[in-house]
Amino acid sequence: MVSLSDIKNFFRGHIAINEPLAKYTSMRVGGPADYYLEPADKKDLVDIMKYLHANSFPYMILGRGSNLLVSDDGYRGAAINLESGLSGARVEGDLVYVEAGVMIPKFVDFCIQNAFSGVEMLAGIPGTLGGAVVMNAGAHGGELSDHLVDVEVLRKGDVQRVKKEDAGFAYRRSGFAGDVVLGASFRLPKGNKEELTKRRREFIMKRNESQPLELPNSGSMFKNPKNNFAARVIEQAGLKGKRIGNAQISEKHANFMVNLGGAKASEILQLIELAQRTIYQNTGIMLELEVKLIGFSQNVAEKVA
């Protein structure tokens, strides 16, 4: 049985009870979590995870809250945010080690400042390193795993190093779904700072021109189907700009759903179901979610997964 008094006996980070998650998600929707935790550092994270596991208490790693859709009813468990406590990056010989809470733009900036190339195309991704590893985030033809050496994870209560070849990386997936990522090491080619800065600027400009970053969103809603693009099939189905309540399939990029102000998770879920149903009826393609559903019933999650 989890209790606040027990947690306070050893946990050194920030704790909140019944904390609304909307302000921690990039879509700006989501009800309260029973517990909201910000570990002070890696040891604090390991300690709280061992405690939660020992008590069979559900948890989720929040990261930056991108690529998540949290139910209006919230989450019956502990939401853990790593952004403040696991925020370090350092050069270790010929490797770059980055902790899980580091924002991807910060990771890219750190690499450029140290004249390392190979990650500048990721500059516009809004999530944290940990989340990006789990989903093998990518952009402009590159993936996070391209130059990755190994990943430090908490697996079944033990801190382990998993080599890239054992990590199960594929398009927008990895073998870390049941683990807590603590950090990762990369071996990156050297580059010219000015050229890398220019390339990063170009990638960010391209992203700003093509994606609705001026509105709350969760990033790409669906994975691209084989030999096609989710945005293309959604647009061809006439769904671009479709609105339910205050949720909308973006008029700028059809694989983004945006919060026009005060949208509910239930409205976004209705748009997801509409897109999947329409595309399947039109093409036989079942769009697979890239966004992770949190706090929804198992029936709902299985229906749209």
Image: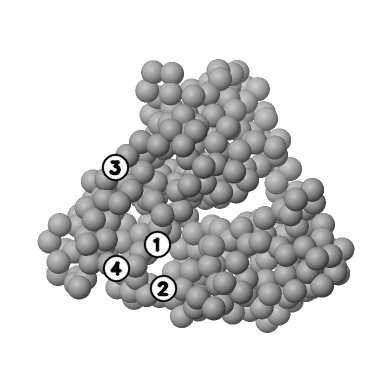
Where in the figure is residue 271, as x and y percent of width and height? Answer: 69, 74
Label 3 to label 4, Cα distance in Å?
19 Å
Crowding near the residue tagged with mark 4, few <14, some 14–19, many ≥20 C-alpha atoms within 10 Å: some
What label sits on residue 162 in the rendered view? none
- 23 in relation to 204, above or below: below
Label 4 to label 2, Cα distance in Å?
12 Å
Label 3 to label 1, Cα distance in Å?
18 Å
Q: Which amino acid does label 4 sit on?
A: Phe
| Of callouts 1 and 2, the N-terminal one | 1
Which of discs 2 and 3 lies nearer the camera? The answer is: 3
> What color scheme is it?
one colour
| SS for dot 1 | strand
What label sits on residue 159 in the rendered view? 3
What label sits on residue 57 in the rendered view? 4
| Of callouts 3 and 4, the N-terminal one | 4
Q: What residue type is labelled 2?
A: Tyr
| SS for dot 4 | loop
- 257 in relation to 141, above or below: below
Q: Which of 157 and 218 is in front in this view?
A: 157
Q: Mark 2 points at which residue?
A: 75
Q: Mark 1 points at which residue?
A: 60
Q: Is residue 124 visible?
A: no
